[in-house]
Image: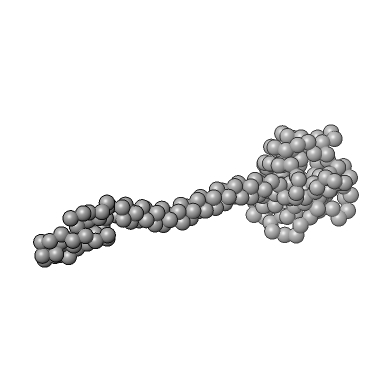
Amino acid sequence: MRWSKGAVPRFFDGKPTFAGGGVKYGRCCREVIPQRGRRTQKMNNDNRNEEEAVSPVIATILMVAITVVLAGVLYVWASSLAGDSTGGGLDKFQFDDRDAAGDVTATGGDDLVHVKMMQGTSLSWALLEVSIVADGGTMNNCVEASEADAEGLKCTYSYVDDKNWDVSEEITISEGANADLCDGTEGFCEIAVTLSKKAVGDNDGGVIGELTATAQ
């Protein structure tokens, strides 16, 4: 009997027969055993199918990772913008406050609070705007004490007589000469202070600081 290469004998009733596809056992299970070449091909196909199944998973993981990285970058960028002072292009300023000396009274003209620049670049006094709200009342725009008119002014601010407001320097915010923003009935007043920079030419203007101080 002549066997071809790669052929596997098939047994029926104990007698071998040849089939190109595999071997069968006659009175046993009639299972077909694939030829070696076809078995290898089937394994290769299975491996290829597994690789094709894994590829979409890897692609999904990469997409998720890229999305997370981009989200982190955007968050950092947005946080840096939020940390800037209000108004595009303004320098970052930080301020601190303290109560002015003396008690608040019902006669007006009281010094209310001091505001110190803790961080920021030199700011010309000519570009500074100051406004306050006392105990949740109406907003009052303050003027420089040196330019104050005794009639009808609500608040003033004063500073060391130089050209610019620099770090560690203070301004003093006071009631106008005939104004009584904080009468001292409660023993103290909450003063909401807003500091702004005027827009000049290409330089942006806007709020550079907001704080709530206590005058007592």
* Quadrant (top left/top right/bottom left/bottom right) for the N terminus: bottom left
**Whether residue 195 is visible:** no
The image quadrant of residue 100 is top right
Question: What residue is at 59 percent from the left and 47 percent from the top?
Answer: 73
Q: Nearer the viewer, residue 151 or 27?
A: 27
x, y percent for residue 159: 80, 38
Q: Nearer the viewer, residue 197 or 115?
A: 197
x, y percent for residue 29: 15, 65
Looking at this view, name the residue that lies furthest to the front: 1
The image quadrant of residue 97 is top right
x, y percent for residue 191: 69, 51
Asked if residue 210 lies left or right of residue 39, the reply is right
Q: Nearer the viewer, residue 4 or 53?
A: 4
x, y percent for residue 95: 69, 41
Question: What residue is at 55 percent from the left and 53 percent from the top?
Answer: 67
Q: How is the image coloured?
A: one colour
210 over 125 or under it: above or below: below
Q: Nearer the viewer, residue 90 or 35?
A: 35
The image shows a total of numbered marks equal to 0
Question: What residue is at 71 percent from the left and 47 percent from the top?
Answer: 85
The image quadrant of residue 21 is bottom left
151 over 29 or under it: above or below: above
Asked if residue 71 lies left or right of residue 94, the reply is left
**Whether residue 202 is visible:** yes
